[in-house]
Image (cartoon, grey):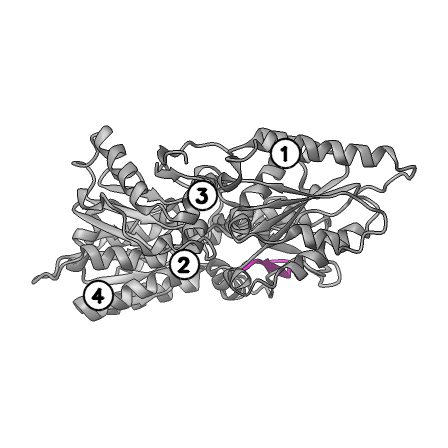
């Protein structure tokens, strides 16, 4: 059995060479199967290669794995693909949890309705399979089988016009890894066989956080290797002389450790640090859910009761996976600091922000992911909280009035925003997607511009022309799935969906800058 190692994250897209090879196989559909986080990375690799039409995603939930009845769903998807005249081969791209649970894909393939005998091959990936044969050798054998089949086919196959559906949202453990950027006092350890480090090292790397992760194989996962991981972790920190710097160690779970029960065991070596928090993430929940879980766990481990209050406000619930860059909060931060308050972004500034959090007069909550922490702090420290995202002119002004009342402070009129009635043409806006910013825009756009909005969460069966839509507001990933050119597209990146692909775009949504951003599109000052 190989020894367990601890490695530092590297900012890249991972095994792009293997992705290029698998998508280069002609007229072959890659069907990616596994937990949402395990197949998310493949979407962005296909996007990078320009082959979204050669990928199909089948996310498997934790309940699916519990009941073990998801093979029928996969079978249906594969048989639908086999009926199309554009595929000469299908590759089932299988992830670690299915290898550990010994999912019987071979039997499923034998039972497929496949009258043309199109090759359906299993490509097993990840650290749970590397011990046996190299992925390159396994892929070569699959490519040869498909090439041999093609030689026997006299028919000319049609072109595949389909585009892969959008990827699953970023995983819970990736959200935890976005906390405390550049703070040497916080160590982040991802407990994984190694493959789970791909997304937070690449597309879901939204700040400059470095983290470390474990590397182990299938045998070590099955036998349980938490003691060995703890020993390797101790050696790593002692070798790099980091134990004096780190005040808080976050031990973060992944699908493999969740499914093997390793998440339930404490690691040896964690007594090296003043505080250790084990975050029970599992890869089946979203980044925002992971952040909510981690914020509460960290607060319970670090916050202490104090006797006096200071002129301090905590901002709870900001995270780049929902809000993008922190600059979007510039107006809010400027307003609060102008009133003489120190502003703490809990979980995004340094660990010191938690040490002073109990001194605050008020907690301002900006998303659902901050509610559990705010409610706990209200109970433990009697700090009131207010939950609202100040999107739109009316929304911002109402938020300011509520904050003024809670602080018992008069906020100068100069902080309130003015709007002028806009001569908007006959606009009709489709808000496409599902997140809290779009929730607020659904109200803000009619209030600020008098423009009606329509809401849809998915692209399926949407006929924009029949809906008489003039503008679409969505993450730019949706543009890969919309073919019409009869509307203006207003980019509103949602990093939990698109990672860091569009996070640098000059877009806005809050306060005066958010109003001005939308106004440019609605009064024809820009073209999509």
Secondary structure found at label 3: helix
Look at the picture and state if 521 lies above or below 193: below
Q: Earlier in the sequence, mark 3 or mark 2?
A: 3
Look at the picture and state if 362 lies above or below 183: below
The label shown at residue 407 is 4
Instruction: Indicate yes or no whether the magenta region holds residue 425.
Output: yes
Q: Earlier in the sequence, mark 4 or mark 1?
A: 1
Report, in whole angstroms, how far the alpha carbon at label 1 lies from the one at label 2: 37 Å
Q: Earlier in the sequence, mark 4 or mark 2?
A: 2
Circle 2 is placed at which residue position? 289
Residue at 25% in and 69% down: 405
Secondary structure found at label 4: helix
The label shown at residue 219 is 3
Residue at 42% in and 46% down: 221
Query: Which region of the structure is painted magenta?
Result: 424-434
- Image position, residue 207 (x, y; %): 38, 39
Nearer the viewer's eye, disc 1 or disc 3?
3
- Image position, residue 497 (x, y; %): 52, 50
In the picture, measured across the screen, residue 30 lies left or right of residue 457, that is: right
What is the quadrant of residue 426 in the picture? bottom right
Dominant SS in magenta: loop
The label shown at residue 316 is none
Circle 1 is placed at which residue position? 138
- Image position, residue 58 (x, y; %): 62, 53
Report, in whole angstroms, how far the alpha carbon at label 4 lies from the one at label 2: 29 Å
Report, in whole angstroms, how far the alpha carbon at label 4 lies from the one at label 1: 64 Å
Report, in whole angstroms, how far the alpha carbon at label 3 lies from the one at label 2: 31 Å
Q: Earlier in the sequence, mark 1 or mark 3?
A: 1
Secondary structure found at label 2: helix
Nearer the viewer's eye, disc 4 or disc 1?
1
């Amino acid at each position: 059995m190989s020894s367990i190692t601890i490695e530092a994250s590297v900012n890249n897209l991972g095994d792009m060479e293997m992705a290029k090879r698998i998508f280069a196989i002609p007229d072959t559909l890659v069907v990616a199967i596994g937990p949402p986080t395990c197949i998310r990375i493949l979407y962005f690799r296909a996007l990078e290669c320009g082959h979204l039409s050669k990928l199909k995603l089948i996310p498997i939930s934790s309940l699916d794995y519990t009941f073990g009845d998801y093979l029928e769903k996969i079978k249906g998807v594969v048989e639908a693909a086999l009926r199309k005249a554009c595929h000469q081969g299908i590759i089932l791209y299988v992830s670690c949890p299915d290898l550990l649970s010994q999912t019987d894909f071979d039997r499923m393939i034998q039972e497929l309705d496949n009258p043309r005998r199109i090759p359906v091959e299993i490509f097993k990936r990840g650290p749970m399979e590397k011990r046996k044969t190299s992925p390159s050798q396994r892929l070569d054998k699959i490519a040869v089988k498909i090439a041999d089949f093609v030689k026997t086919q006299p028919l000319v196959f049609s072109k595949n016009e389909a585009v892969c559906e959008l990827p699953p949202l970023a995983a819970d453990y990736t959200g935890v890894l976005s906390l405390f950027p550049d703070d040497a006092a916080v160590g982040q350890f991802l407990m994984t066989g190694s493959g789970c480090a791909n997304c937070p090292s690449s597309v879901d790397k939204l700040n400059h956080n470095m983290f470390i992760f474990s590397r182990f194989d299938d045998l070590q996962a099955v036998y349980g290797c938490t003691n060995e991981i703890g020993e390797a972790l101790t050696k790593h920190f002692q070798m790099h002389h980091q134990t004096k710097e780190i005040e808080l160690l976050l031990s973060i779970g992944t699908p493999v450790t969740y499914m093997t029960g390793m998440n339930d065991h404490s690691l040896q070596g964690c007594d090296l640090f003043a505080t250790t928090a084990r975050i029970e993430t599992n890869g089946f929940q979203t980044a925002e859910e992971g952040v909510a879980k981690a914020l509460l766990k960290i607060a319970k481990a670090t916050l202490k009761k104090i006797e006096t209050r200071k002129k301090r406000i905590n901002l709870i619930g900001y995270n780049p996976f929902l809000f993008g860059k922190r600059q979007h909060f510039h107006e809010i931060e400027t307003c609060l600091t102008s009133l003489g308050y120190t502003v703490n972004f809990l979980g995004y500034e340094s660990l010191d922000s938690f040490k002073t959090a109990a001194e605050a007069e008020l907690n301002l909550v900006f998303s659902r992911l901050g509610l559990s922490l705010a409610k706990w702090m209200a109970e433990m420290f009697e700090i009131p909280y207010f939950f609202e995202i100040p999107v739109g002119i009316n929304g911002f002004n109402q938020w300011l009035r509520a904050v003024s009342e809670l602080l018992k402070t008069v906020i100068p009129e100069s902080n309130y925003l003015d709007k002028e009635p806009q001569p908007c043409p006959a606009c009709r806006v489709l808000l496409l997607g599902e997140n809290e910013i779009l929730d607020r825009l659904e109200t803000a756009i009619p209030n600020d511009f008098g423009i009606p909005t329509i809401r849809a969460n998915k692209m399926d069966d949407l006929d924009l022309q029949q809906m008489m839509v003039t503008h679409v507001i969505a993450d730019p990933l949706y543009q890969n799935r919309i073919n019409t050119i009869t509307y203006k597209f207003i980019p509103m990146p949602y990093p939990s969906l698109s990672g860091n692909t569009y996070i640098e775009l000059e877009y806005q949504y809050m306060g005066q800058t958010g109003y001005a951003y939308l106004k440019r599109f609605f009064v024809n000052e820009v073209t999509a």
